[in-house]
Amino acid sequence: TPHVGVLALQGAFREHKHALERLGARVTEVRLPRDLDGLHGLVIPGGESTTIGKLLVDYDLRNPIRDFHARGGALWGTCAGAILLAREVHGAPKQFGGVQPGLDLMDITVRRNAFGRQVDSFEEHLHVQGLTEPVHAVFIRAPIIERAGEGVDVLARHGDDIVLAQQGRLLACSFHPELGDGDALHRHFLTLAQSA
Ligand code: GLN
């Protein structure tokens, strides 16, 4: 069974932990660089990307997570986590001069809070490339992946907008899979982590 971590600084990490444990994975809550030791993958959960980003800086976690990925670890960013994986973020608040701290790893451009106030949150069953069953996706003040670079595979869209993408051992989704029914994406991530 794979041993994976869930970044536990802020946001919806407990739901991810439970979903992964239900699949038989060993799960560690990651708060310090040494918590990454021995892991095969790390989930960066939804929440508030500016808060999580600031805590990543305060706890000196950014380079350890980048090194973890470079050594072969899989990373999965969901909602705010996808924002933190992105190389480019649109809609960052002014207090950060338009550039909020993140991991700067995945060749995607993400727009924060892209669905506007009228549709703050919604749910949808998404067709995901490579999966036979649809994925129950819960979107909460969700970002959109506006651009996916050449090495990035688009795995699902909401209308025309990219909401799930993969680049090697990096997986990013706009929505909260841990709040929906079903565990297909958590299984996909464990497969990715296991092959890492
Ligand atoms: N709106 C949040 C952000 O931009 C993300 C929301 C979420 O993770 N549910 O950080």
Image: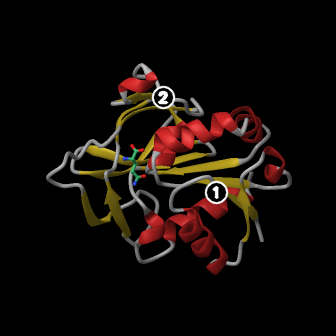
Q: Quadrant of residue 38?
A: bottom right
Q: Is residue 181 visible?
A: yes
Residue 114 on image: x %, y %: 27, 42
For the residue marked with disc 1, what is the amino acid? Ala
Residue 77 on image: x %, y %: 53, 49
**Please, is residue 22 above or below residue 193 in the view?**
below
**Please, is residue 51 above or below residue 97 in the view?**
below
Residue labelled with disc 1: 8
The crowd level at tag 2 (other Cα within 10 Å; few <14, some 14-19, many 20+) is many
| Residue 196 tag number | none
Way the structure is coloured: secondary structure
Q: Is residue 166 visible?
A: no
Residue 55 on image: x %, y %: 61, 41
The kind of secondary structure element at disc 2 is loop
Residue 47 on image: x %, y %: 46, 53
For the residue marked with disc 2, what is the amino acid? Gln
Pick whichever of labels 1 and 2 is earlier in the sequence.
1
Position of residue 107 in the picture relative to residue 30 (left or right)? left
Query: Residue placed at 57% from the left, 67% from the top?
Result: 16
Residue labelled with disc 2: 100
